Amino acid sequence: MPDLFGNVVPVDGTDALKPVIINDFLKRKELSFVNPRNGKNYHRHYAIMPQGGVAVIDVGKYVDGNFVYATVGINLSGNQYQPYIVIGCHHKEFSDINLIANMVKQSLNWALAGTNTTVKLVACHKPIAWEKDILHSYMKGMDNRMFNPMNVFGYEMLEERFEEIGKSKGRPRKSINIDDYLPKAMRQKIKDWLHEETDQYQYPIDMMRAIRVLFELEIIKRPTYEAFVREFDKEQQIAPSTYNSYMNLNNNPYEHDATYASMKADARRKFLLDSV
């Protein structure tokens, strides 16, 4: 931000990035935020941990259980150019460049709240050898790792913490094994109940009750279509689009279904009370 006389104040890239990382490390914002423009929830994950004022993040949203994102390089080191952000690649479902840029700006400013620092993105129209520059800055940061300012609160602990967050809050796995979506402590009990409530049915509205109940109650993670049909041998009875529709909690095909309500109560008694 300019000083009182309108002069550009040089940016110390690492100092600008540091409060963002500390904010994330303390999990005050859970690495997710709401875009005020459309009210939707977005998330970010670190693809490359910060080194020497450089970081790479994935910014995006969850669509039907899959993380649709853009990979964004942040170079605040000032080794060769002014601090800049580059959109390296993105999913075809997340191709609005202006929206991606807005998400990056929002995610940084949300984490910088209270630091008297804000990010403003301006389109760059000059050529920048950003791949070489980011690599050079990152390698320099690796060489100087022991002097990394992140060490003021324990860089090694920071790295471990983000690994832990990645395991507990991270991207859904695309396993075709139903076991990977069930809690280990009750896995067999849940599978037995699911088969009891699913195997006998041939129509989607009947066969999907049990799996949706457990997902809605957050007893299990959301299984992929492949994991579901493989476990219950239902590939000929339900299409992927139908499965995704029934597993979408924004839809409520069982709103007035007494059987569904009874099944949900049964699942609470069997699985939630047991875990208290």
Image (cartoon, rainbow, N blue to C red):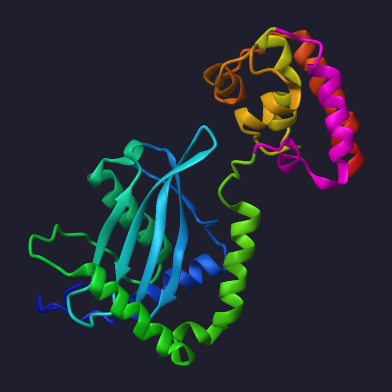
The stretch in magenta equals 176-202
Q: Is residue 163 rendered magenta in the image? A: no
Above-or-below relation of 49 to 183: below
| Residue 202 quadrant | top right
Name the spot of residue 227 as percent of width and height, x first. Answer: 67, 32
- Does 231 sit left or right of 226 as displayed? right
| Residue 251 quadrant | top right
Name the spot of residue 68 as percent of width and height, x first. Answer: 42, 42
**Most prominent secondary structure in the magenta stretch?**
helix
Above-or-below relation of 174 to 168: above
Along the line of sight, which residue is nearer the eye, 181 or 276?
Answer: 181
Above-or-below relation of 222 to 170: above
* Residue found 42% across the figure and 38% down from its top: 40
Could you tell me how many numbered marks the image carries? Answer: 0
Residue 273 visible in the shown view: yes
* Residue found 57% across the figure and 16% down from its top: 239
Question: Where, quadrant-wise, is the C terminus in this rendering?
Answer: top right
- Does 53 sit left or right of 156 as displayed? left
